[in-house]
Image (spheres, rainbow, N blue to C red):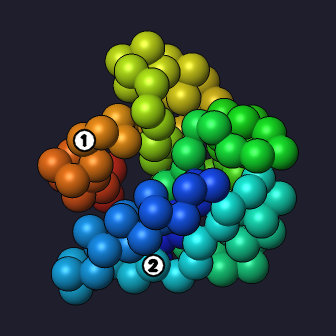
Amino acid sequence: MRILIADDNQLVRRGIAGLLASEKDCEVCGEAAEASEALQKASDLRPDLVLLDVSMPGTNGLDIARLLRKQSATLKILMISQHDPQQLLPRSLEAGANGCVDKARLATDLLPTIRNMFAA
């Protein structure tokens, strides 16, 4: 699957790319550091999944998720946040995302969450 990582923190993007590097079926097709870049790269690169930070410069990730959902009904969107995912989940789903993961738990939760999204 082709994955776009959208987070304003380069260390987070690099860390996620590192987690995905060992997965044979995962390809990081691009990275974005701000909202407009995320929207443009999603349109140009046509990823299967966008990992999207809730707090992005330019606009928040929930607004970006709404715009991404308008671009594609089949795109998978996974919100990543330092905020409590249980509180964020209802708003994420309403915005068109497929789920959310706590940044503090990316190392343990990211891959299983991605696998579950594509298994459904």
* Front residue of this view, candidates 27 and 48: 27
Distance from Cα at disc 1 to Cα at disc 2:
20 Å
Name the image quarter holding the N terminus.
bottom left
Quarter location, residue 59: top right
- Rendered position, 68 above or below 89: below
Visible residue check, residue 49: no
Q: Which residue matches tag 2? A: 28
Query: Residue at the location (45% across, 42% down)?
Result: 80
Disc ID at residue 21: none
Q: Nearer the viewer, residue 94 or 40?
A: 40
Against 92, is 17 above or below? below
Give the residue type that dot 1 points to.
Arg
Q: Which residue sits at x=58%, y=78%?
A: 30
**Which numbered disc, 1 or 2, marks the residue closer to the eye?**
1
Can you give x and y, in whole percent of width and height, for residue 77 in the image?
52, 50
Q: Secondary structure at mark 1?
A: helix
Residue 50 spot, x, y in % from top left? 53, 59
The reply to whether dot 1 and dot 2 touch (C-beta < 8 Å) is no
Mark 2 element type: strand
Residue at point 37%, 64% (across, down)? 16
What residue is drawn where x is 76% and y is 46%?
57
Count how many numbered circles sit on residues in the image.
2
Whether residue 11 sits left or right of residue 95 in the image: it is left
Q: Earlier in the sequence, mark 1 or mark 2?
A: 2
Residue placed under numbered mark 1 in the picture: 105
Which residue is at the far top? 87
Amino acid type, callout 2? Val
21 on left or right of 108: right
Q: Residues within 10 Å of mark 2 (few under 14, many from 20)?
A: some
**Residue 103: x, y in percent?**
37, 42
